[in-house]
Image: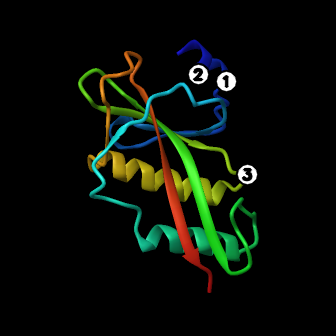
Amino acid sequence: MNVLAMTLLLLAATPTANDVKVEVGTGDWSSVPYARETGKLMAGAETVGRIEAALERGRCSLPGLSRRRLDLSVPFLLHFQGNGELTRVVVRKLQCPEAESVIASAVLELAKSGEYRPTGENQTGWYRGELSFESQLR
């Protein structure tokens, strides 16, 4: 956990319902085990539409963005307490606050809905995952 804490650059922390903090950060997350995914839920068309709207406003660009296509995978971290309660969501910094906010909200909702669960592999409660988007742009 010390390596994670030292490499994690926290840019924004927003308390949400149930005191889940949503943050944006960077670091080497490769040693963090993956969360268990049910595969039953996914980010919907509304999430992709909100990302597209942010890009259309021209405030930022994203890796994996071309004039006609969005192909984006965003790593994230989740922290669970010992009882399985979600306490933090950290989304990889993309240099696009609007898109980061939309993606963080999607990850939070998916995790709260049970799509991502701890496996028990990590005593500190940290797990990682990745949210991917593919879309033909308008």
Left or right: 51, with 88 as reference point: right
Disc 2 element: helix
**Residue type at mark 1?**
Thr
Closer to the eye: label 1 or 3:
1
Which class describes the residues within 10 Å of circle 2: few (<14), some (14-19), or many (20+)?
some
Tell me if label 1 and label 3 are in contact, CB under 8 Å.
no
Q: Amino acid at mark 2?
A: Leu
Q: CA distance from mark 3 to mark 2?
A: 21 Å
Q: CA distance from mark 1 to mark 2?
A: 5 Å
Please tell me whether mark 1 sits on a helix, a strand or a loop: helix
Q: Quadrant of residue 13?
A: top right
**Residue 118: image location, x then y, percent:** 32, 31
Find the residue positioned furthest to the top.
2
The residue at the point 41 percent across, 17 percent down is 124
Residue kind at label 3, given as amino acid type: Gln
User: Residue under circle 3?
Assistant: 95
Q: Are marks 3 and 2 in contact (CB under 8 Å)?
A: no
Circles 1 and 2: CB atoms closer than 8 Å:
yes
Q: What residue would you read off at disc 1? A: 7
Q: CA distance from mark 1 to mark 3?
A: 17 Å
